[in-house]
Image: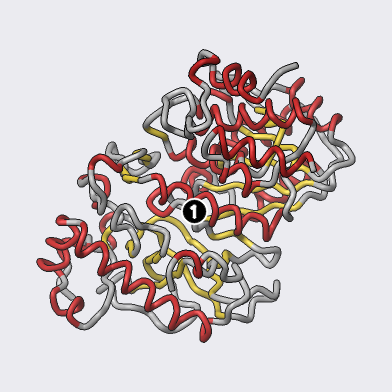
Amino acid sequence: MNWDELITLPVYRLTTKQKSPLFKKALQNLAQYHFENSEDYRSIIQFLYPAQWLNKEVPPLAVSLFKHHLLKSIANDDVFKITTSSGTTSQHVSRIVLDKINIVRQQKILSKIMQQWLGPKRLPMLIIDHANVIKDKFSYSARGVGIQGLSLFGYDHTYALHEDMSINMAAISQFFETYKNQHIIIFGFTFIIWQYFIEVLKKHEKHFKLNNVTLFHSGGWKKLQALAVSNKTFTAQIKAQLGQISVHNFYAMVEQTGTIYVECDAGYLHCPVWSDVIIRSKKDLSVIEELGVEGVIQVNSLLATSYPGHALLTEDLGVIFGEDNCNCGLKGKYFQVNGRLKKAQVRGCSDTQS
Amino acid sequence: MKTINDIFAESLDIPLADVTDDLSYQAIAQWDSTAHMVLIGAIENHYDIMMDTDDIIDMSSVAKAKKIIKKYQQ
């Protein structure tokens, strides 16, 4: 299948059995493309995984490789934008090389996924951040990428925070008043929503009675875990301040922008048809087929065409709970992310010979 | 009466003479993804339309924009 066909696939309707052969073939083709077009990728594969490669496997690269190497499968002239990660765990940030076609496709796929949750129409949008976070031009931070990407689904983009991260209560109240009878979208990063929005509303005993709101948040739980705030606490506190609104976390990374994993009403993250999640053992990085067992998350995405980021071993721990039978009705794999891997827990892929 | 070219010039903060049909998204520093959303807002206000997400993504040149706007005016 080429992209003209891939893009028409239903986001969450294929069963694992239907998706598997299609996905495997497309991923192998993509890996072959990178092998032919990225010298660095070819060297890594030939040096570390010659046997797996001959066996038509697609070995994952450690996501940290993108922090040290500018990996790309396109000519210098075609480089359009380089996005960077927020780099929460180290001084280094990932750098992802994108060409025009890759960027457009990321937006289109993201749009297909989001429409499953928001419907086809754009909605008034409240962004829990300040406007300057997207002003940087050629190089985007993960926060900028997220906000920029999600902006497509809204209109009258209203920023809830001032540049010093203090709350703009007037803007927020006015936004809720203007759109009180309409479906609205709220988006922000998990920690920022908690620290600079929900906690502040709570402190000022400010309550809203909203109901037709879909709130999306992402960015990871590391900082909130340190404060002992779970997903449950987070959602409950949001509802206490804002009302009975719909709250969806999503798992995403700048290294595979576009294919995000949205949390359903049953509380599980779902794989869209264009990406796949695999759990690997912390001990030896072998694939864990059994459901319900925690391990290191590998993400595969067909979207990574301008850089060899199609199969990545993340630094996150997670559990796949099942396939095709989530209570919410969506097909495919569903999983949870349990947190970051401690550095000592696993040897990086570059020094593993499994 | 404001033309679509005027809206482009104002939103992207470029001289009107620089707005040609083949001017394309990201071809100049002023038309980046942030400016794109500003531009969309200006077009929507002026023509009193609401574009679909896919059209925003597809609006990759001035010529394309004209085509898309026409679609909403029918």
Q: Is residue A194 visible?
A: no
Q: According to the image, label 1 marks what residue?
A: A258
Q: Is residue A186 left or right of residue B17?
A: right
- Residue B48 in percent (x, y) is at 80, 31
Q: Residue furthest right?
A: A181
Q: Residue at x 28, y 54 (%)?
A: A343
Q: Residue at x 40, y 72 (%)?
A: A279
Which is nearer the eye, A300 or B41?
A: B41
Residue at disc 1, secondary structure:
loop
Which is nearer the eye, A112 or A213?
A: A112
Quarter of the picture containing the N terminus of chain A is bottom left
| In the image, residue A331 above or below residue B48 | below
**Three-letter amino acid code at the position of disc 1:** Gly
Q: Is residue A353 left or right of residue A138?
A: left
Q: Is residue B29 left or right of residue A125?
A: left
Quarter residue A3 falls in: bottom left
Quarter residue A197 falls in: top right
Q: Residue at x 75, y 25 (%)?
A: B46
Q: Is residue B68 left or right of residue A37?
A: right
| In the image, residue B47 above or below residue B56 | above
Quarter residue A53 falls in: bottom left
Q: Residue at x 49, y 61 (%)?
A: A337
- Residue A102 in percent (x, y) is at 41, 51
Q: Is residue A34 visible?
A: yes
| Residue count near mark 1 (Cα–Cα under 10 Å), binned few <14, some 14–19, many ≥20 | many
Chain letter of mark 1 equals A
